[in-house]
Amino acid sequence: MGASATNNSQLEWLGRDTIEIRRLIDSALPSFAAPLADMTDPNRHAKYLVVVDLVWRIWYLAMSIHVLLEQQVYPPAIVLARAVWEAISTLGYLVRHPKFQDEAVVLLAFSYQQLIKQFAHQPNLVKERTEILERMPKDLVAEARRRAG
């Protein structure tokens, strides 16, 4: 390592890391574009949707942490660090699971069930998410409900 590399702070490295994460996302986008646009297999679509959502979430959280730390606003940065950990853990769990696709559908069903509860006052959202849940495999939606309990 040269002298300039050792003089960098962790905050500066985080700033560079967020740029690198974005570069990696951009380079992977073409491989995700076709599966995300292909709705012929809803469960496969759900798998890609969940993965892309988690990857973007990780990047946004990393950027947010960097900005908060630059401004020396530490408590929210700690909360976001926990959210990054949860997103990375979820992504790791999914891609290593023998039934990756089913687990992605369960996660998506769980998310939709939570949205319905949280936004019960928004009839359009409730109707849309309920209709999607009704088209999902019944056993996977039931599994999402069971795990929520």
Image (cartoon, rainbow, N blue to C red):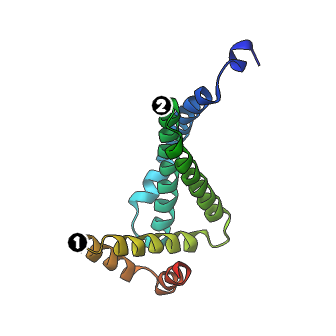
The residue nearer to you, when weighing 134 against 142, is 142
Which residue does the image show at 67% across and 71% down from the upper left? Answer: 98
Going by the picture, which residue comes out furthest to the right? 1
The residue nearer to you, when weighing 40 against 94, is 94
Q: Quadrant of residue 90?
A: bottom right
Location of residue 120 in the rendering, given as x and y in whole percent from the top left corner: 29, 75
| Disc number for residue 124 | 1
Location of residue 95 in the rendering, given as x and y in whole percent from the top left corner: 63, 61
Which residue does the image show at 38% across and 79% down from the upper left? Answer: 133
- Report helix, strand or loop for mark 1: helix
Location of residue 38 in the rendering, given as x and y in whole percent from the top left corner: 41, 62
Which residue does the image show at 49% across and 54% down from the upper left? Answer: 52
The residue nearer to you, when weighing 69 against 35, is 69
Residue receiving disc 2: 71
State the CA–CA distance, disc 1 to disc 2.
39 Å
* Whether residue 83 can be seen here: yes
Location of residue 96 in the rendering, given as x and y in whole percent from the top left corner: 68, 63
**Left or right for 140, reference 100:** left
Looking at the rendered image, the quarter that the N terminus falls into is top right
Relative to 99, is 25 above or below?
above
Relative to 63, is 90 above or below?
below
Q: Alpha-carbon neighbours of circle 1 within 10 Å: few (<14), some, or many (≥20)? A: few
| Disc number for residue 93 | none
**Left or right for 97, reference 143:** right
Query: Along the polypeptide, which appears first: circle 1 or circle 2?
Result: 2
